[in-house]
Amino acid sequence: MIINDAHCHFFSTPFFAALGRGLKDADERAPHEAALARLGWEAPGTAEALADRWIGELDEERVSRAAIIASVPGDARSVATAVARHPTRLVGFFMVDPTHPDAVAETTSALDCGLRALCLFPAMHRFGLHDDRVRRLFDVAAARPRTAVFVHCGVLTVGVRKKLGLPSAFDIRYGNPLDVHALALAYPTVPVIIPHFGAGLLREALMVADLCPNVVLDTSSSNGWIKYHHGLTLSAVFKQALSVVGPDRLLFGSDSSFFPRGWVREVFEQQSSALDEIGESDETREKMFGSNFDRVFS
């Protein structure tokens, strides 16, 4: 079975530098070193070196293709470099803050460099999805066939910030999947990806996906949000999602990010076991773990 991963973070040197600048003891000439020293993680090196490391990891784990996400605004270049180096294996996503005055220009530039999806984090950057600045970004995506928009909804925690003791002044009131509805209807040719099954707002994510055929759900991470739903299990999540959305609009994701941990096989195994528990077919597995990704990112 082909495995494609729709959700991996590309933790580049600029990413760690952005974190390091928030630490009091960081050397302003190399802020990434302070963040990495405190975390105890391996330094990523250049974007080329990190791209090669990811390909080696994917080869070892027999993963065919992966989406890699530039995980701070302004780091699209790192991912673009990685994708240019391994274009048949890596698909580039990038984070953009619509409230930034250069957001449209940054988005256009990233797409010009071959990236395929812009990522919105409303709770992180404190904006509503009904904001005209968001629609301007959807306009850019709609004008570029084969471009997707990733919208993080629900609970948002950034583990690396917690480890570093950095504040996360997020506002999850902006993370309701129902706010995706009007945008998805207005831009029917743009695939809209809601990760983590809505991260605690499963009901709302399923409602939007049921109403909008261009909405797809990614299954990434440990899905720890399940703890907010009494008695819910991962197998029940898959059963409900498949009954509403069907097998053609689920994208497997691991939420892998840093080294030396690398690709998180445990997430794949947990999701595969959940499908076993509900007796899903090989066809469903093939779509969720492989061909749906290839269709969206052909």
Image (cartoon, rainbow, N blue to C red):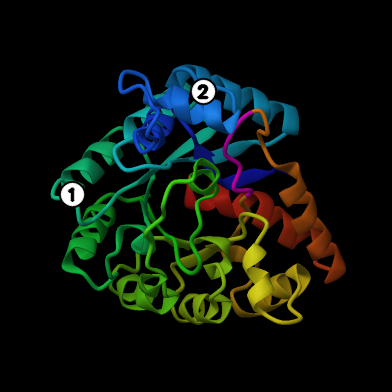
Question: Element under label 1?
Answer: helix
- The location of residue 265, given as percent across then percent down, is 74, 42
Q: What residue is shown at x 45% (from left), y 67% (from top)?
A: 153
In the displayed structure image, the side of residue 226 where residue 193 appears, left or right: left
- The location of residue 55, given as percent across then percent down, is 60, 25
Q: Specify the amino acid type for callout 2.
A: Pro
Q: Main secondary structure of the magenta part?
A: loop
Residue 231's quadrant in the figure? bottom right
Disc 1 to disc 2: CB gap under 8 Å: no
Vertical arrangement, residue 15 with respect to residue 142, above or below? above
In the displayed structure image, the side of residue 173 where residue 67 appears, left or right: right
> Which residue has dot 2 on it?
44
Question: Element under label 2?
Answer: loop
Q: What residue is shown at x 25% (from left), y 45% (from top)?
A: 107
Vertical arrangement, residue 241 with respect to residue 74, above or below? below
Q: Specify the amino acid type for callout 1.
A: Val
Label 2 environment density (alpha carbons within 10 Å; few <14, some 14–19, many ≥20): many
Is residue 190 visible in the rendered structure shown here? no
The disc placed on residue 104 is 1
Residue 13's quadrant in the figure? top left
Label 1 environment density (alpha carbons within 10 Å; few <14, some 14–19, many ≥20): many
Is residue 207 visible in the rendered structure shown here? yes
In the displayed structure image, the side of residue 238 where residue 8 appears, left or right: left
Magenta residues (range): 254-259
Q: Nearer the viewer, residue 259 or 289?
A: 259
Q: How many angstroms separate mark 1 from mark 2 (CA)?
A: 29 Å
- The location of residue 42, given as percent across then percent down, is 59, 23
Precedes in sequence: disc 1 or disc 2 = 2
